[in-house]
Amino acid sequence: MDFLRPTTWQEALAAKADRPDAVPLQGGTDVMVELNFDVRRPAALLDLTRVPELRAWEMTGGYCRIGAGVSYATVIEELSGPLPGLAQAARTVGSPQIRNRGSVGGNLGAASPAGDSHPPLLAAGAVVEVESRERGVRMIPAAEFYLGVKRSALEPDELIRAVHVPPATGPQYFSKVGTRNAMVIAVCSFAIALHPRERRVGTGIGSAAPTPRRAREAEELLARELDWSAPLDPALAHRFGELCARAAAPIDDVRGSAAYRAHALGVLARRTLTWAWNDYRRAA
Amino acid sequence: MMRVTFTVNGREQSADDVWEGESLLYVLRERLGLPGSKNACEQGECGSCTVYLDGVPVCACLVAAGQAEGRAVRTVEGLADGGALDPVQEAFAECGAVQCGFCTPGLVVQTHDLLARVPRPSDAEIREALAGNLCRCTGYEKILDAVRLAAARKAEGAGYE
Ligand SMILES: Cc1cc2nc3c(=O)[nH]c(=O)nc-3n(C[C@H](O)[C@H](O)[C@H](O)COP(=O)(O)OP(=O)(O)OC[C@H]3O[C@@H](n4cnc5c(N)ncnc54)[C@H](O)[C@@H]3O)c2cc1C
Ligand code: FES
Ligand code: FES
């Protein structure tokens, strides 16, 4: 096995172009588990922790551009204001030790349907910035990034540079079902983001389909019928929950049954919409 | 195979013939003779391998050895000041927070970090900070006692640190 350690982004791209079989390594909280248990024996590891750009975030072009190596701990400490949905999700990841090391970029790289970053990224309308030496930068909307179970639109010679997330213009919530408050892979999860300027509500479903996904019909329902100057109609909230549950394609597994996941998703969707709506009305 | 050099508890150390996929935990325990950090799960679930990496608590089982190159690692062996135990270590011993002791090194490092950041943590903050450290013996109550005692002693500053 080779251990590649680029110290600049250009070197990292060159290393990945020359060795598309190299496995990128950031916080290692997914990769090292696979190595320790001999699930994976890559020909090379590409350590990205020495590329300083990846650990920084900045506001640019109206978006918050989060370097792929930014840890959950940093998201919680520094981005709770502009990105409340993502920060709430980050707070539920693993344990403090995992949050110190695990990164949003690593969550995207792993592309697990249960990854907690994905629902808030979908709800906010995030865009993933990937790059290769040969073809340069591609900007991939989060909704087009997840292709299958642990499969993403990333090509073998590409690396994730950053994710661009629009700062919140309205309330956002993330909610996750699990057996305890820490160290839990989501049974299912849901994120909501109110976009009052566009009179639109964004959604993200986690751990209840082969990929994280939006509940599009539920979003369209609210775009059509939500009255932004009135209290939330409980019947509408209920239909929203039903459509979110229907948008999922859950399976039975050790963490929960498909039927439970669909039910719980409906509840999470209705609840988070209600919380967000109450916040919105209070602020308005 | 490669050579890895980093600072451990203030002293520069090297390990040779390190496999590229090897964890920092393995290097500490099996190559550098520092068995304080425990290996109980190798998947980040138990926290018994917690060490400081450049001042930040991490699971050493999930850090590739090569990622530690040139960095500073502090293990449970590096908390005591010469012969004097750190107040956290003393409190754990006094409160009966140690039974089999397997979880202790990780809990001690994690508590050490908590008290450095939050000198008087609430119970909720203690539970949150220690959520990634599993103990199968004590039932956690005595561990919470130990953290509270260490916090109180550190706050008094009575001859400690
Ligand atoms: C005990 C434990 C608890 C956990 N709990 C949760 C949880 O609650 N919620 C959750 O979502 N996840 C959880 N995880 C999984 C993991 O922590 C997250 O997926 C995390 O975001 C991974 O980030 P990392 O930096 O550690 O990634 P790594 O392990 O370094 O990499 C993960 C994947 O992304 C690829 N990759 C990394 N960086 C890049 C890049 N720049 N470009 C292209 N590919 C890249 C890697 O090759 C690999 O395939 C947990 C893991 C453990 C061990
Ligand atoms: S051995 Fe590292 S967390 Fe359990
Ligand atoms: S004392 Fe035995 S695991 Fe904690």
Image (cartoon, coloured by chain):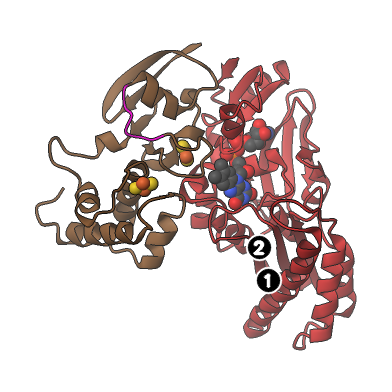
Chain colours: A red, B brown
Locate residue A248: give its quadrant: bottom right
Q: Nearer the viewer, mark 1 or mark 2?
A: 2
**Residue toward you, A132 or A30:** A30
Specify the principal SS of the magenta part: loop
How dense is the environment of label 1, judged by Cα within 10 Å: few (below 14), some, or many (20 and up)? some
Which of the two labelled residues, at mark 1 and mark 2, occupies the earlier sequence position? 1
**Residue toward you, B98 or B112:** B98
Residue A82, numbered circle: none
Range of magenta residues: B33-38
Q: Which residue is mark 1?
A: A170
Picture coordinates of residue B158, whole percent (x, y) = 10, 57
Picture coordinates of residue B135, whole percent (x, y) = 40, 50
Total tally of numbered discs in the picture: 2
**Residue toward you, A51 or A44:** A44
Q: Secondary structure at mark 2?
A: strand
Q: Amino acid at mark 2?
A: Val
Q: Secondary structure at mark 1?
A: loop
**Residue toward you, B134 or A114:** B134
Is residue A157 one of those drawn in magenta?
no
